[in-house]
Amino acid sequence: MINPSERLSAPLPRRRFVEVLLSGGFLATAAAFFYPVLRYLIPPKASDLGADSVVAGRVGELKPNSGKIFRFGNRPGLLIRTADGQYRAMSATCTHLSCTVQYRDDLHEVWCACHNGMYDLNGRNISGPPPRPLESYEVQVRGEEIFVRRRREA
Amino acid sequence: MNPLPKLRQWLDERFEWDDLIAPLREKAVPLHRLSYWYFLGGITLFLFVIQVLTGILLLLYYRPGANEAFESVQYIMTQVQFGWLIRSVHSWSANLMIFTAFAHMFSVLFLKAYRKPRELTWVSGVILLFLVMGFGFSGYLLPWNTLAFFATKVGTEITGQVPIVGKPMMIFLRGGEEVTGATLTRFFGFHVAVLPGLATLLILVHVLLVQRLGISVPPKLEVEWTANPSVKREMKFFPNFLLRELMAWYVALGVLGALAAIFPWNLGVKADPFVPAPAGIKPEWYFLFMFQTLKLIPPKVWFIDGEILGVLAFGVIGLLWLLLPFFESDHPSRTKRWITGVAIFALAYVAGMTVYGHFAK
């Protein structure tokens, strides 16, 4: 005599087995599709053209109390000649929302047009929204060329 | 002999055409003194169709890429016959569409058309509004001019402020750490493939819901009309309302053509990552209210960064906005007054901040 509950439950494990196999298979297929797609969406790391030292300009190119943007690797840098003739260099990427800053000869300060951020000639944030100072660089005049290099970590 | 009845019979025999258009025959639009506001959704749809058509035309000459995009738009505007007009219509229509979408949303809000059973129509509509703003943001970069370059830089940087997911999202949007030609390629893909696909799908859902549920009546009238059905007034959708809607489209087309021809959209200066951001730089007007708010929040609120606080606040408000119908009462006689209050405040805030942002230094 077969127990009716046994008869009912008998086909179930087999069905369950097929279900697990199928759904597991589908999940694995989905993972095999989506994993490469997700990885594809993330851009490859661009090689940082992080030159440690670049020629930012030539002597005589900048009048006192003016500034220019130079390429420092793949980011912009700002070279300033102060009113008394000294050279200063710093990153030109505003620490607030990454706009490119400029030298204001009327204020003798560094200004970001996007949200009115101000930095002094050493790159210190003095007013407006910028949360941090601009990274300042070392300037060396060698012959006719003005070299700018990252400051070594102390 | 008129071939139309024959054609209709032919279609009917093949896929029961008459049954398919039967609901359209029954469809009616409630008539009352605020019925004019029902035109706005249709006008937005019309402008979307204009966007698709002019967008396809621009694709014939536009080339994405940091070294080609600006030049190709310049080519469209100076060499291609009527190229300036097509681009101008595309830009103006985009701006008008965002405006009518906002106006449509606020009219739905004030007429309380989002109430049960139309919650999903509202949800799909708000998502469509977000998509439309995505269209605006991605399309703005495509000419690769200075304004667009910095707007994209700031916009994606703001995304990057969101805790945890922000940075990866920013890199995903930019196609790298910086805004470069890779960003342009991505935005082009979003603008001409991803967003149009999503928007078309959602528009279908949105319009289908409107067809299924019929057009909403303001709660006060609904109570009145239910109590006394003899005062109920309606207009047949087909052809009466549709013909009026077509006239509204015709007016919209006239306004669009005039704006595009009299004030052609300019191109600006080619983007250069190595020049400073120009003075007086601002986002497009439909982002101004958020931009101005972010500007007013102090750099540090308690111990949280002001920018992060602002971005999170807008995120939460956006989500609540999406779910707004679920806070409303099911009964037309007991609608929530505070929702109307919120709607008035939101409209005043958005309009006020936009004007303030426009004139602020």
Image: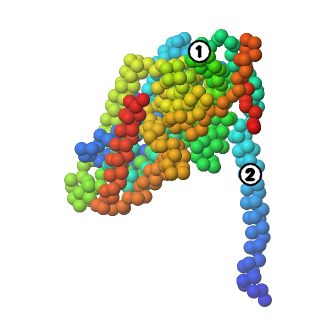
Q: Are marks 1 and 2 in contact (CB under 8 Å)?
A: no
Q: Quadrant of the N terminus of chain A?
A: bottom right
Query: Could you say which quadrant of the image residue B33 lies in?
Result: top left
Left or right of residue B38: residue B86: right
Tell me residue A62's x, y (percent): 62, 14
- The residue beneath circle 1 is A64
Q: Which residue is nearer to you in this view: B271 or A127?
A: A127
Residue at 59% x, 15% y: name it: A64
Tell me residue A7's x, y (percent): 75, 80
Left or right of residue B14: residue B243: left
Q: Identify the colour scheme used.
A: rainbow
Image position of B318 with respect to B352: above or below: below
Given the image, on which type of amino acid does mark 1 rest? Answer: Pro
Residue B53 at least partly seen = no
Residue at 75% x, 36% y: name it: A153
Number of marks in the image? 2
The earlier-in-sequence mark between 1 and 2 is: 2
Given the image, on which type of amino acid does mark 2 rest? Answer: Ala
Left or right of residue A86: residue B126: left
- The residue beneath circle 2 is A31
Residue at 69% x, 28% y: name it: A137
Tell me residue B182's x, y (percent): 67, 30
Residue at 38% x, 17% y: name it: B262
Residue B266 at least partly seen = yes
For mark 1, give the secondary structure. loop
Q: CA distance from mark 1 to mark 2?
A: 62 Å
Q: Which residue is nearer to you in this view: B216 or B357?
A: B357
Q: Chain of mark 1?
A: A
Q: Chain of mark 2?
A: A
